[in-house]
Amino acid sequence: MALPYPGMAHASNWQTAVALPMTVEHDSNPRLDTSGVKAVTRTIIAPDYNLVGTYGRDQFKFGLGVSVEHSSDTSVIKDREDPNLQLGWQRETEKGSYGLAARYVESSTLSSVVEKTGVVVATDGTQKLYSLAGNWSSALSERSTLSNETGYTSVHYDINSLINYNELSNRLVWRYAWSERAEPFLRFDVTRYEPEKGFAVASSNSYTPTAGVKYQFSERLEGTVHAGVNQVSGTNGGSSGQGGVEVRYRGARVDSSLDVSRSSVASGQGGFAEIDQVQGRWSYAVDEISRLGVDASWQDSKGQTPNTLRKYDAWFSRELSPFWIVRLSLMYKERQQDGLPDASGEVFGLTLAYSHPDF
């Protein structure tokens, strides 16, 4: 939060946070192969450092991390060192704020970061993502707010089966505080997809007007519902209904959420892919230092390679000290793909994590 201004124009406050998760996991089918399945044991160390500072009305953010992964079988999963870098600046004004954010992220093409776009690959390649975004918001009245975010994203792969592309997007949102509980909103998204030269895929545009409302049912229960229409131009273009429902409950011991949505996202297999998705999370505080939970997700992609991906994850965590936590997890995953047998696998993981909120 920004400090008062201009009376404290030269006051500053800096905070740092350090995290160091260390994971050992055994994956019975990391590539979700339908034949010749090979299991892999991975060791992952992912240190992360964040610095947030305020100077008058300005807030600055800096984040630096790396995920170092060692595989028991490099012919299936390679040893990896995936860095990530984030930079941000935000300035508060009398009626709102504006700012800039940039990031660079490397990740495996087998990771959930790539899977959420419906991409199916059988090779452990690398996705490199560069992005730059600008945002602003302003109060139009005591109850209404207008905000906008414009972003540029460039995605590159090191395997020939995927398409490098650039994405230019803009999101305009109007919100109205109807009451203490209800906040209706209107949103308009425009996205331009441009493949790099040399790929036999046409550029295309996506337009999505949406209307919705956020509602606070009680102190612990809130929900959001939105609906709209997506229109895609270019090859294989067309229109479809889009929207979703989100519900979140935060209790004394129970924390749960449900998210059901349909959206169109840029795909490494060319153009936009329509994604239907259901995500559910539930966790229970056994005592002050122990928690158990279940996460489940279902994703149906209608892109160039139609497929359905399911994941079920049960976990248990326990605080060993104010800065150390241990977590056990067991996941079952399954993919159904047109023209191929179903593929499934199990992942057993043990994580020991250190975190310090003010290092």
Image: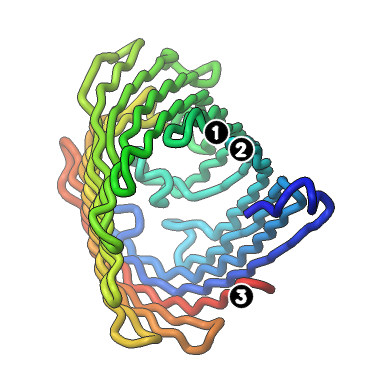
Q: Residue furthest right?
A: 10
For disc 1, the marked residue is 137
Q: Secondary structure at mark 1?
A: strand
Residue type, numbered disc 3: His
Mark-to-mark CA distance, 2 and 1: 5 Å
Left or right, 78 with respect to 185, comes to right
For disc 2, the marked residue is 97
Q: Earlier in the sequence, mark 2 or mark 3?
A: 2
- Of badges 1 and 3, nearer the viewer stands 1
Residue 331 can be seen, yes or no: no
Numbered circle sitting on residue 29: none
Q: Quadrant of residue 311?
A: bottom left
- Are dots 2 and 1 in contact, CB under 8 Å? yes
Q: Position of residue 211 (x, y in %)?
A: 28, 29
Which quadrant, please, contains the N terminus? Answer: bottom right
Q: Position of residue 242 (x, y in %)?
A: 24, 29
Mark-to-mark CA distance, 1 and 3: 32 Å
Q: Earlier in the sequence, mark 1 or mark 3?
A: 1
Q: Position of residue 170 (x, y in %)?
A: 49, 25
Left or right, 298 with respect to 101, comes to left
Left or right, 305 with respect to 92, comes to left
For disc 3, the marked residue is 356
* Depth check, front residue: 255 or 291: 255
Q: Earlier in the sequence, mark 2 or mark 1?
A: 2
- Identify which residue is drawn at 28% across, 57% down: 248
Mark 2, Cα crowd under 10 Å, few <14 / some 14-19 / many 20+, is some
Mark-to-mark CA distance, 2 and 3: 29 Å
